[in-house]
Every structure is written in structure tokens, then in C-alpha cells.
Amino acid sequence: MIAGARVALKKIWSGGTGRIGLVLVVVILAVAAFAPWLVTHEPNKLDILHRFAAPSLEHLMGTDQIGRDFFSRIVVGTRLAVGVALTVIAAALILGTLLGIAAAYAGRQVERVILVLFDKIGRAHV
């Protein structure tokens, strides 16, 4: 397993777009993991006195129309997005595995029903 992962990472790293994609994924996961330590301001705190503030050392990406810090909101949003993505991936993995097991053990008719069902769902979303 580890040797296969090493080969896959080496292939990804050898291509220019693969390298960029891998770096972006690692950065996004790191931001999500370290979000509590990266947030500089309360993301939903209103600060009318500093609305539309330009990027500075106090507000790294500036503020919006009601004074909320953009950087803090992006960091917290990244954490939420990664959590949702991982939850959906886990649910798809579990459901796909269960349907695969059902198709393998239940017989040809159930396998065909599952195949046709997912073929129609796949074509509807393309």
C-alpha cells in the first residue's frame, strides 16, 4: 500500500499541473487543520468603524461592508468546506461499498438493477 502511494505521488509530482494541484490540496488541508490558530479576528464580528478597510497588517485581506475580516472568514470557511467534503466522500464510500457488496452477492438481477440505476443517474448529471 505504501509503495503504491509512493509511486502515485511520484507520478503526480512529475507533472506540472499535478504538482500545483498537490500543493494546493496540502495548503487547503493545512489551513483547515490549523484554522483556530490562523484566525486573526472573530469571523462574524461586526466592526462598522473599519468597514471596507484595505489590506493591512491588522486585516490581512481587508474587511467587507460591515467590517468583518475577510481572512478570518476565508479560513473558517475553508475548515467548513473541507469538513463537508470529507463527510460526503465518506458517505459515498460507504454507500458505494454496500451497493457493490449487494450487487456481488445478491445475484445477476440485483446487479443489473443497480447498474441501470446508477447508469441513469450518471447520465442525468452529465
Image (cartoon, rainbow, N blue to C red):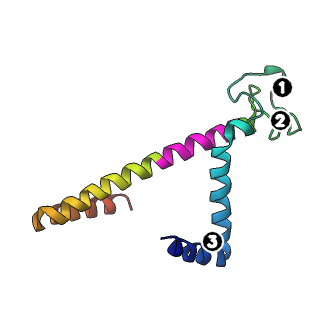
Instruction: Out of 112 and 35, give the one closest to the viewer.
Output: 35
Evaluate whether residue 15 shows in this view: no
The residue depicted at 84 percent of the width and 32 percent of the height is 53
Disc 2 versus disc 1: nearer the observer: 2
**How far apart are the two marked residues, 2 and 1, measured between alpha carbons?**
10 Å
Question: Which region of the structure is painted magenta?
Answer: 73-86
> Residues under labels 2 and 3: Cα distance?
32 Å
Which numbered dot is residue 59? 2
Secondary structure at numbered mark 3: helix
Residue shown at the point (86%, 33%) measured from the top left: 58
Q: Check disc 3 and give the amino acid type.
A: Gly
Residue wearing tag 3:
18
What residue would you read off at disc 1?
50
Main structural element of the magenta stretch: helix, strand or loop? helix
User: Given contact means CB atoms under 8 Å apart, are the residues at marks 2 and 1 in contact?
Assistant: yes
Disc 2 residue type?
His
Indicate the quadrant containing the C terminus: top left, top right, bottom left or bottom right.
bottom left
Which residue lies at the image location 19% right of the left edge and 59% below the top edge?
A: 102
Q: Looking at the picture, how far across and down is residue 11, in whole percent?
A: 59, 78
**Location of residue 124 (image quadrant):** bottom left
Q: Is residue 44 above or below residue 26?
A: above
Horizontal arrangement in the rendering, residue 97 relative to residue 38 (left or right) = left
